[in-house]
Each structure stands twice: as C-alpha cells, then as structure tokens.
C-alpha cells in the first residue's frame, strides 16, 4: 500500500533540482511505497529524472514558473506563493493533493507560507520548528522551538512539549519521553516567570500524558543523552542550536588541523581513522536532516539548504514516517486528553 504523496520543492536548497531529485530517487529506492509530486521547473525536473526511471514512475510533475530566493523576505515570498515551487508544494498539501511537503529553501518563507496556508491545529497557538540532534545516548534529542517564535509564554511552551513528545514517540519508539525546559540552571528558582509557570503546568499535566517531565536542562547537557525533548522559545533555542553546530565544526576542524600538523600526526590519523570516521558520521547534519514544523494542519519538513542527496533522502524518509504514524492526529489526541481548560489553568479541573 502506497503512502500519501510527498510534495518536493525541487527548486529549494543550495544545489536545487539535482540534489532534490537525487535525494528523492534514493528515498524511493529504499522505500518503494513512496509517491511524489515534484514541484518546480518542469524542463529541469524532467532532465534530472532521466537518470532515475524508478522515481519517474512514482512521480507527477507540477510546473512552477518561479522559485523563492534564499534571502527573500517572507512578506514578499507570501505574495508569490501561487507561482513559486515552495508555495505550490505547500498549497498541494492544503488541497489534499499531497500528504506533506519537503523543501530545502528559505526557512522564514517556508514557515510564513505554511502557517498562512495550513493554519495551526485547534488547541495550538503557534507552530514550532523542531529538529533531532545527535547525543551520547541511545537516541537523538529533539529540540523545539528553533526559531519560529522569538517570544513565548508558558502556554506556548506547554504546547511545544506536547507536540515534541508526540513527534519523539514516532521518531524513536520511546513511549514516555523525558522532557525538560531549556534554562540557565536546573534549580526551580532559576529562569523567567514564563519558564517557571510552564514547569509548574507540565508537572501537573504530565500524569495525564505519556511524558516524564524532569524540570530544567542547561545548554551544556543538550547532547549528553540525559533528556529526550528539550523545549525552549525560538530565540534561545536557535542560539543554542547554532552554538552546538558551531562547536561540532570547531571540533572537526581542530582535529583536521591536528592530524595534518606533522608526519607523526598523519600516522596517528591513520591509526585512529575508524574513530574519526565514527565522529564524522555522528556530526554530519545529513544524518539528522529534516526539521519539522509542528502544530500545523499538515506536515511540512525543512531540509538543510546544503544537504546532500543522502540528507534529502533522510528528510523524505522522516516525512513518510510522520505521515504513516499520523503525527497530526497523535497531537490532537494528546490535546484532547488534557482539554483547553487544563492548558490554560495549569491542570486544575
């Protein structure tokens, strides 16, 4: 049985059509149930499909005369939604022509157009951008929000926790995710009033959900494997994410410099190559590709703009899994279990 079609914005990302089509083709070879709606310049898409007959047989092309630039302002992008590959891919989800959309294009434009076209789910005030990051534990850690909302109140943070836990269950199979709020300390008195209020509410509602709320976590513990879902406002979350990514690049560049500094170092590199390859694999963003906009009436996944075909294939596979497990209905069920009044008052019914 085939899954609902996945709309691919073929024009997004640093490499554009070639990488997006190569990635979709790789995903199709791994999972032959995938069906696609390829949105973009029809001539260029058909040329790219010549090397991928298996993908061509499982795809329909939707011609889009324009594409969103990487530096285009979201306000301008919204006005061109009906004629751009990104906007048309999202609109295909709205119209039921596709079950989900994947784009490697402009993040701000993708969020703005997705929110306008699909709207937020009942019971969710704001969508959140979420992503899985590598850890030393058995599973990746999910972080949200990573930049969609610079300011959040306690209610928003509680909603993010509910959405993040639902997503994490699908991604990892862990039935009771460990959830924490990103803070400047782990003591109960630390942080803003919004954080403290959100912590109080999550303690009260966690018994009604399959959530193990464990208080606060500091940024230096993000990758330790001690927490499953980290909840934050978009401003703090984006800074933390960029710091983690920067530290990863610093470590790899430092190792590269150290291993090429002398003949002895080069020999040491050969001896330790299996370990360095494992490190490279763990830190490669292509192996954790696919940021999900949670809280919308539809599934939208953002691929890294610099993703390789492997990265795009991983983003497509994640998208398919979210469709198969019906992420939206899972979030709706958790929200219904608590009820609107519980979210507003902190669980006092």
Image: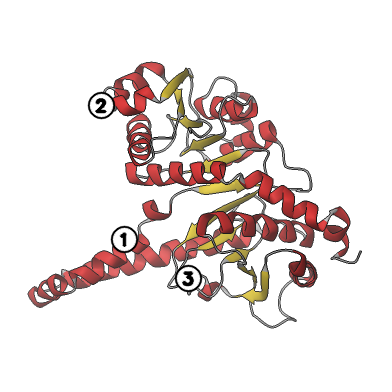
The local crowd at label 1, few if under 14, some if 14 to 19, many if 20 or more residues have their Cα within 10 Å, is: few
Which residue is drawn at the image coordinates 47% and 70% (left, top)? 223
The dot on residue 281 is 1
Q: Secondary structure at mark 3?
A: loop
Few, some or many residues within 10 Å of mark 3 (<14, 14–19, 20+):
some
Res 306 visible: no
**CB atoms at circles 3 and 2 under 8 Å apart?**
no
- Give how far across and how far down residue 9 sits, in percent: 47, 31
In screen coordinates, is 70 left or right of 125?
Answer: left
- Residue matched to label 3: 223
Cα separation between marks 2 and 1? 28 Å
Secondary element at image label 1 = helix
Q: Is residue 231 above or below residue 167?
A: below
Residue drawn at the location 46% of the way across and 39% of the way down: 104
Answer with left or right where residue 42 lies relative to residue 5. left
Q: Mark 1 vs mark 3: which is more N-terminal?
A: 3
Q: Is residue 298 visible?
A: yes
In the depicted structure, whether residue 62 falls above or below residue 24: above
Look at mark 2 in the image and give the residue it sits on: 51
- Residue 248's quadrant in the figure? bottom left
In this picture, is 52 found above or below 15?
Answer: above
Q: Of label 3 and label 2, which has the lower sequence position?
A: 2
In percent of width and height, residue 211 lies at 67, 67
Q: Which of these two is toward me, 296 or 317?
A: 317
């Amino acid at each position: 049985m085939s899954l609902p079609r996945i709309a691919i914005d073929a024009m997004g990302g640093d490499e554009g059509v070639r990488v997006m089509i190569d990635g979709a083709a790789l995903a199709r070879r791994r999972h032959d149930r995938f069906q696609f709606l390829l949105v973009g310049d029809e001539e260029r898409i058909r040329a790219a499909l010549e090397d991928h007959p298996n993908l061509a047989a499982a795809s329909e092309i939707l011609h889009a005369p324009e594409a969103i630039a990487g530096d285009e302002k979201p306000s301008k992008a919204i006005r061109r939604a009906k004629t751009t590959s990104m906007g048309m891919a999202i609109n295909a989800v709205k119209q039921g022509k596709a079950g989900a959309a994947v784009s490697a294009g402009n993040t701000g434009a993708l969020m703005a157009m997705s929110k306008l076209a699909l709207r937020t789910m009942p019971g969710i005030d704001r969508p959140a951008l979420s992503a899985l990051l590598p850890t030393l534990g058995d599973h990746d850690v999910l972080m949200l929000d990573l930049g969609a909302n610079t300011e959040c109140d306690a209610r928003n943070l509680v909603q993010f926790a509910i959405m993040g836990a639902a997503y994490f269950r699908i991604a990892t199979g862990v039935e009771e995710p460990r959830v924490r709020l990103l803070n400047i300390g782990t003591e109960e008195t630390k942080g803003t009033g919004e954080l403290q209020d959100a912590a109080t509410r999550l303690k009260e509602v966690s018994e009604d959900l399959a959530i193990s709320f464990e208080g606060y976590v500091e940024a230096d513990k993000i990758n330790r494997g001690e927490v499953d879902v980290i909840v934050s406002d978009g401003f703090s979350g984006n800074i933390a994410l960029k710091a983690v990514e920067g530290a990863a690049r610093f470590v790899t560049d430092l190792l590269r410099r150290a291993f090429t500094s002398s003949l002895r170092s080069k020999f040491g590199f050969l001896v330790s190559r299996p370990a360095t390859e494992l490190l490279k694999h763990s830190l490669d963003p292509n192996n954790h590709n696919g940021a999900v906009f949670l809280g919308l009436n539809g599934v939208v996944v953002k691929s890294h703009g610099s993703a390789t075909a492997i990265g795009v294939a991983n983003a497509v596979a994640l998208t398919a899994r979210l469709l198969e497990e019906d992420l939206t209905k899972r979030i709706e069920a958790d929200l219904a279990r608590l009820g609107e009044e519980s979210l507003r008052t902190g669980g006092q019914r």
